[in-house]
Amino acid sequence: MKVLILGPSGSGKTYISSQLRKQGINAVDADKIEGLSSWYDGAGNKVAYKDNADEEFLNNHLFLWDRKFLEDYLSKNPDVYLFGVSGNIFDMLDIFDKVYFLKVDPDIQKERLTHESRENLMGKTDYQRRNAVRWGKELEQKAKIAGIKFIDATFSPKEILYEIQG
């Protein structure tokens, strides 16, 4: 079963996937899959992400997944819980058996984005955090329209796994 769990930055995708892996579950953080994603400029060229990406960078670049790469990855990993998000995520839903959305309250999201344990570079600046919350609201609306089942992002990894498997 190929399961996608998506949500905005700060919804807990990395943390939950790492906790599930400790239980022997094939839960993968999409950001850790080398070759799956890249940042692109308006002309479609791959560009390096700036650690402190500002408004100009974020408004003129997209973080996208490579569909062909993902299809190949999923063919080699037919039983996987993939945690991640990209600018073209809604174009990828059809290659998964199930899809879930981690719904996070904006205040909790902001708190998580500033937590000292956070490894992901997105959310390090005030602008990035504001952008992450705005983008999270947009993702949530698109997920509602797509009929994706929501899971409370404050649930424990065990509770989230139960929701997914239930």
Image (cartoon, helix red, strand yellow):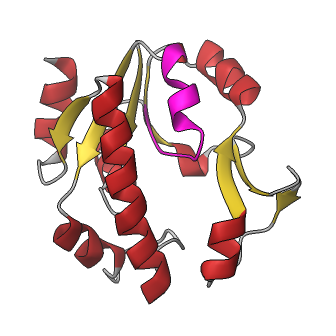
Observer-nearest residue: 155 or 49?
A: 49
Image quadrant in which you'd find residue 160: top left
* Pick the front one: 88 or 99: 88
Question: Residue at point 32% right, 29% down?
Answer: 145
Q: Is residue 23 visible?
A: no
- Give percent across and percent down for residue 118: 39, 73
Identified at 38% across, 51% down, the residue is: 138
State the image coordinates of residue 63 (x, y, percent, origin top left): 65, 54
Question: How many numbered circles does the render carry?
Answer: 0
The quadrant of the rendering that contains the N terminus is: top left
Picture coordinates of residue 125, whole percent (x, y): 48, 86
User: What are the residue bounds of the magenta stretch?
Assistant: 82-94
- Left or right of 108? Residue 19 is right
Rendered position, 49 above or below 138: below
* Viewer can see residue 93: yes
Q: Quadrant of the C terminus?
A: top left
